[in-house]
Image: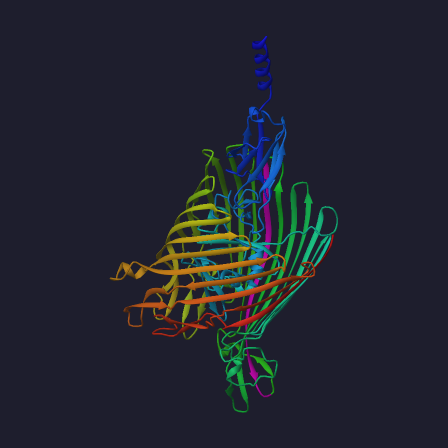
Amino acid sequence: MRSFCFIVIALLLNTISAQEIKVLSSTDQSPLIGATVKVQKTDASTFYLSTDQNGKAVIEPNKFKGSNSLKITISYIGYQTLSDTLFPDQNKTLLLQPTTYGIDNVVITAQYSPTSVENSVHKVKVISRQKIENMAAVNLQDVLTNELNVRLTNDNILGAGMSLQGISGQNVKILIDGVPVIGRLDGQIDLNQINLNDVERIEIIEGPLSVNYGSNALAGTINIITKKESKEKVRVGLTSYNESIGQFNLETNLNACLAKDHSVRLSVGRNYFDGWNAGDDFLPSFAAQRADSGRAKQWNPKEQYFGRIQYNFNYKKLLLSYKGELFDETITNYGLPRRSRTSFVAFDDYYHTKRIGNALFLQGKLNEKWSVNWTAAYNYFERIKEAKRKDLVTLESSRVLEEEGNDQQDTSTFNLWMSRGSIATTKDSTWFNFEIGYDINLEQADGKRIKGGEQFIGDYAAFITTEVDITDNLLLKPAVRYSYNTEYEAPLTPAINLKYSKKNSTFRFSYAKGFRAPSLKELYFNFDDINHSLFGNSDLKAERSNNYSASVRQKFLVRNILFKAELAAFYNEIYNQISFAQSSLAGGDTLVYFNIGENQTKGVNLSLSTIYENWRINLGSSYTGRYNRLADENPIEEFSYALEFTGNANYEMQKPQITLSVFFKHQGELPGFGYDSNGEVLEQRIESYQLLDATISKNFWDKRLRVALGAKNILNVQNVQANLVGGAHSGGGSISVGTGRTVFIKLGLQLSKD
């Protein structure tokens, strides 16, 4: 009889299956690998489990012996701890919420579908809306000022440019919601023209993404994600920004849910800057200005108008959107007074820029297995230079005649038609997913300096990427892109990315080929006057590159302090680099674009983040080497290295709702070599400098009103010494960095109705 009872009990135990606990992220339902599961029985005995690669932990039936239920506590770095009760014959799926500091942001750039930073094969850096607000950033230049491995340049006419990983900004792809920004001047996109008034976050991937985005994505990709929807039925916002250098901005936005699945978002604004000189008063003066030498500004006056409208339609798990954008800017370059026969006159230049953008998007899941991402867009860019003679006595203005100077009046326009679409499998339970897509870009340029007055270039590409789970912890993503271009031989572009993760450690490695297509200016530019000549070259080849990147990331807890450390390294080699040089055929001062150079950059980055209660601190350092091309023929160092540091701290006081933020960057000395006017090799350098900003902000009226006060460029850096050879500053001089120390106030009002 006793043996029979044992047999019955054994059979009963075998009929009770093991119970599963599945732990997922609430942001994208991705599995949280290595989450700690604390299981406590009614007798207070405790045991621990860890989730596998699918986010699952298994509790065997015998664990319920002597207990009617189990208390489970789930913890994972960067997420809120969750407690629950588990009963026999019960499986549970638990969604963990990210902590308020958002350590695991959702990203979409080069992804099959929205995913977390941790689960992305690519190393993605996210600049959140919270950081943009804490910095009181107005445009893309403001927010990139504090980013590691980014160096900014300023030009009174061409605007703000950048370099990434030691490579010029003409090799950086800038996107807004995946649509390329056009209108490069001297190879750069003016970062001041990209306003952040309606931006949700910014995603940065360093290294080539040419497989996904084609030309210019050689050094890296910056994708600016705009706001789409809100949960309120109606939401109205008004933001005012005023800075002591004479900056006055005003912006308003409206978000409305028209029906269950329909919403519309509208935003319009104006940014105004009245110009700045080093001798100006600390606070702007609204008194009439004298028409003396002070009318010419070191930093030119600028006025911008912008607007955006977006319509969203949700159908099941698909989002269909239309977005229309308009941007208009005028930069005024005041000239110095001159005496004429009868009066005093000045020659002023006006630079008018207009951008118009239209885009359609279809994104989301077709079913449990397939997702789609499709974009079609048309962008228009117009740049007008207008020269006027102004009588400073009568205040009358007249256009300067063409015969007085070939470059006094000029108009250039660019049109871009693009479409990119892909379909991908996104099933978590399979070991193999893939994406297949196409990318079409048609660009047209018009202007008197373009050969024939008008030129057209077309690029047609197909790409495929795959994600293969080699093991539970190892993910491999090979990819390739094939292109056909109407003007140059397009290279085949492969890439391979690898990610290995185990508990709180992540290792990434990538190899990718990149390329930069010759621009229409480099192919067909035609400028000739009595001073100099510059011509394009229709025989140019695409710049090509090899990029090797590796990083290791570790998260760990010490008591209740969260640390995140990352060490990364990169190496770039660029072939067929496009630059201009004197032509032996044309002679004289004639310059022609050629594929004449090779370039290399390499570097290492170290970053550390820590979160403790209401504190968040980020530190970073980079050491970047730039190849000296002259080392091939001269006894000089092959690489010149530059060091930089960044640091920012954020403290949130919950009860009074006050946030304190500090941002610091040390931009190290930039050395190099160049030829002087006698053909001798001389060392050149741009001196180091430091930038420091601080902001204090507070919420009022149940978070409807936000007030921010702060100071920018606290260390009052205006110009730095530059000993450059072969340029405008040959033999010594300075370059402009900032407008000096300023203070600002920003007011944000948000009213909503559920």
Residue that protrudes farthest toward the bottom in the picture: 342
- Compared with residue 238, is residue 23 higher up or lower down, i.e. above or below? above
**Magenta: main secondary structure:** strand
Residue at horizontal 52%, vertical 36%?
Answer: 433
- Compared with residue 16, is residue 654 higher up or lower down, i.e. above or below? below
Please report the bounds of the magenta region as a residue range.
369-393
Residue 196 % position (x, y): 58, 60
- Compared with residue 57, is residue 188 higher up or lower down, i.e. above or below? below
Residue at horizontal 60%, vertical 52%?
Answer: 377
Instruction: Name the side, left or right, on which 635 lies relative to 396.
Output: left
Instruction: Name the side, left or right, on which 358 lies relative to 35.
Output: right
- Front-most of residues 22 and 279: 22
Residue that protrudes farthest toward the left in the picture: 635
Which of the 4 quarters of the picture holds residue 654? bottom right
Q: Residue 542: in sight, yes or no?
A: no
Is 482 within the magenta?
Answer: no
Residue 586 % position (x, y): 36, 67
What quarter of the picture does the N terminus occupy?
Answer: top right
